[in-house]
Image (cartoon, grey):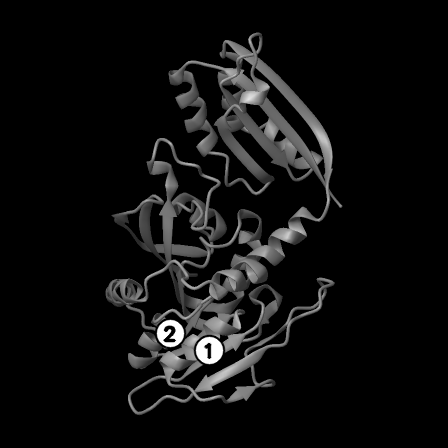
Amino acid sequence: MSSFIRYIALFKASPELVSEIKDAFKSIVDWSGLYRASFEPADPVLSSENQDYNYSLLIDFRSDAAYAAFQQNKEFSGIIDKLKAADKLAVVSTRLQAKTEEKQDVVDTSVDRWTSMWEAPEQGWNAEKAQQQHEKNYAYIMEQIKADGGSIHDCYVPLCGDAPIVSYLSDKGHNVTGAEFVLKAVESLLKSLGAGSARQFASSPYQPAEGDGKKSHPIIQHVSAGAAGRGSARVLQGDFFSFSPSTVFDFIYDRGSLVAITHDLRGKYTDIIKKALKPGGYIFLECVDRAVSPDANLMAGPPHHLPLSVVQQLYPTDQFKLIHAQETIPTRFGQMQRIILKKL
């Protein structure tokens, strides 16, 4: 049973004021003290002849301390000031109990949801387009890392699915490790690698995490030995969030991984990534900024809203140097961005 503090504001405001409140709201949605937040047109059920609210703001805080801290937050205070300027305003703050909501988010994100997607006749992504994008990303990555005076040898692709980048990096002579839970995705990836059915249960660079009270999934390592001129490739099949790294890589390729998981899992995900990357190593991320659209739902996803400013909160500038950031193509989700970080 988890406890939350819920803040609800129903209000009637002009389109100009609604736009100002929405802009202010964008600055808080990725704050770690929030469980969820939404800014939407008011439910018609809430409106009547006497209470014609046109918008609603709902925020669930993780704890009393998070709510108290937010009351001192200047961005949140700015929202409150703007709400007070509305023609009509009703505010409700209440404590509530939510049964196993956070636990369900973890299961739904790391296992059940993606397993269901892989069992569908079509997965919703185009392998040929993905291959083309991976090739463009690789050229961009190597250009930026070379300009920084670095190089990469041992690569890690978390939540890899059957992404062709695993095989592509191997073809380029890099040693590659991918991590994936869904068996169907692993089998598809192994087929692209030309790997046999070799499975190892002992010699994995990860060990089940301890102390979190969860039963860890077994870690199965599928190995594809590198041919002449080709790097080795291996796939770790298991729950990414039950892994604890005991070895490090000098490059991590994150296209569609961090943006795929829910906001509440980002800290746990990036903690694992930080441990898996050695000092001087590089991270490549492909992210999406949903805020470029005036009608964007910043809580929608995947892919979830993840601009550069949030990336640098998750990978702080005292630990990671920004090597390069580049906007690429606008999509129906928002503006895509390519980012390269270096661990200090």
Identify the element where label 1 is drawn: helix
- Of labels 2 and 1, the one closer to you: 1
Give coordinates of residue 133: x percent, y percent. Answer: 27, 62
Give coordinates of residue 147: x percent, y percent. Answer: 24, 64
Measured in 3D between alpha carbons, the distance from the residue under mark 2 to the one under mark 1, in whole angstroms, is 13 Å
Few, some or many C-alpha atoms within 10 Å of disc 2 (few <14, some 14-19, many ≥20)? many
Please tell me which of labels 2 and 1 falls first in the chain: 2
Q: Is residue 248 visible?
A: no
Q: Between residue 87 and residue 247, name the one nearer to us.
A: 87
Q: Is residue 153 above or below residue 43?
A: below
Give coordinates of residue 302: x percent, y percent. Answer: 45, 50
Give coordinates of residue 180: x percent, y percent. Answer: 50, 70
Few, some or many C-alpha atoms within 10 Å of disc 1 (few <14, some 14-19, many ≥20)? some
Quarter of the figure that contains the C terminus: bottom left
Q: Is residue 2 above or below residue 281?
A: above
Residue at image point 48% right, 40% down = 299
Q: Is residue 305 above or below residue 161?
A: above
Relative horizontal placement of residue 200, taking residue 283 as reference (left or right): right
Task: Residue at the far front: name it.
Answer: 121
Residue at image point 73% right, 45% down = 99
Identify the element where label 2 is drawn: helix
Q: Is residue 230 visible?
A: yes
Identity, as a three-letter code, of the amino acid under mark 1: Glu
Q: Which mark is residue 166?
A: 2
Task: Residue at the far bottom: name it.
Answer: 228
Q: Which mark is residue 187?
A: 1
Identity, as a three-letter code, of the amino acid under mark 2: Val
**Marks 2 and 1 in Cβ contact (< 8 Å):** no
For residue 136, what is the image quadrant? bottom left
Residue at image point 54% right, 75% down = 237
For residue 229, what is the image quadrant? bottom left
